[in-house]
Amino acid sequence: RAVDEYRVRTVSGGVISVLSCVLISTLVVSELAAYLAVERRTEFVVDPMREDQLRIYIDIDFPAMSCELLGVDVLEKTGNAQLSVTNHLYKTKLGATSSQGTSESEQTRSKGGGKKAVKAFHLSGARAALPKDYCGSCYGALDEDQCCNTCDAVRRAYEKRGWLLGSADSVEQCVREGVVSFERSTEELVNNPDGCNMRGFVEVAKVAGNFHIAPGQTFEINGVMLHDMSKLHNIHINMTHRIHHFTIGDSYPGKKNPLDGVSKMSRTDGLTGVHEYFLKVVPTSYTRSGWFGRRVEQRHTYQYSVAEYFHEVLPSERGRVLPGVFFVYDLSAIAVVYDDRRSSIFSFIVQLCAIVGGIFTVAGMLDQGIYHGARAVRKIRLGKAD
């Protein structure tokens, strides 16, 4: 037999029932969202990773420098060095720029003028007629099914790969067109830079060191490293640069790269300088778990913090201080472990049962209290009336 409070319809009972259903629905939706969301757990441990190499990915613009002048060197604290690194690095010309790093094409557009392109020196402008089915070789710079029918096409294919096309005599298209030289003088490269985008990655040992991008050429003699800038003596070096992307190791959800988007302008008063970025590299392990706690992804990568410093090279220091962009890195012995996981399905079910059962229980107790309280008040009132 049902008790009276469950058989009698009351306004208070209806209000409590409606509020209970709304509260249950809200909490169930909230609990479902929490279950579907990924919770990141962070842990700090001594670095357990044993990789002996790490990759540094870069994408940097040098709008006031020519690609021919820039080189990349890696120096490690162990004494090992990689000089004039070219593997996995690609240099692409941005277009002719002024010494202030402003594109000439932008200047001429604003003035309504035309842009004069810098071309290779020709003995003659005459070109022989080519067969209709002619397909010139790209000399390994492009796939075999692609054609380079002109000397300029070969040069652009080599630039796209970041390769140096040294002599025009060995290129059939250039010989046919009468091109005798690709080279421009150092003064012309500095005064009329094309701008340079450098992208790709550098592999370095997992020890402290630095890699730098600087004009000139580095070479080793009897174990001593020398940097030759004799051709750039008394020439203003504008190392204005814009870092589009700089990351160490693979990416993972939520990874932040402090150097992305950084832009530095060099002074235009004749003084050059050294741009230094001091990086603290932290080994990072990322794990993502799927449904039912099953591990679906694991990555070993790195993140970093950075501090910046600019050293102005005075006239008295020229020849002793190398202008350029330096990335000095050191590794932390403490690693960060990220674990992205969802709550257990069983925990979710228990939470739902607790929400529904708890609210119904509290609502029932509240309804009983109101019902019996109202009856007691009515009895008291009826007794006073009698």
Image (spheres, rainbow, N blue to C red):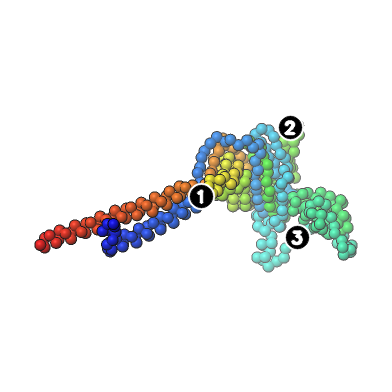
Q: Is residue 132 left or right of residue 26?
A: right
Q: Which residue is mark 2?
A: 223
Q: Amino acid at mark 3?
A: Ala
Q: Nearer the viewer, residue 95 or 296?
A: 296
Marks 3 and 2 close (CB-CB < 8 Å):
no
On screen, residue 245 versus residue 123, left or right, reads left
Disc 3 to disc 2, how far (Cα)? 43 Å
Depth check, mark 1 against mark 3: the one in front is 1
Query: Image point 64% across, 37% down: which residue?
Result: 51
Q: Around disc 3, counting alpha carbons within 10 Å, would you say few (fewer than 14), some (14 to 19), or many (20 or more)? A: few
Percent across and percent down for residue 48 are 58, 35
User: Label for residue 166?
Assistant: none
Q: Mark 2 is on which residue type?
A: Gly
Q: Residues under labels 1 and 3: Cα distance?
A: 54 Å
Sequence-wise, which precedes: disc 1 or disc 2? 1
Question: In the rendered structure, which disc, 3 or 2, sits on the residue that comes first in sequence?
Answer: 3
> Which quadrant would the C terminus be assigned to in this image?
bottom left
Q: Residue furthest bottom?
A: 112
Note whether residue 199 is visible.
Answer: yes
- SS at mark 3? loop
**Residue type of the residue flagged with mark 1:** Val
Q: Residue at x 75, y 62 (%)?
A: 116
Residue 180, quarter of picture: bottom right
For the point 76% across and 58% down, which residue is it?
Answer: 118
SS type, badge 2 = loop
Q: Residue at x 70, y 52 (%)?
A: 196
Question: On residue 38, which mark appears?
Answer: 1
Q: Nearer the viewer, mark 1 or mark 2?
A: 1
Residue for badge 3? 117
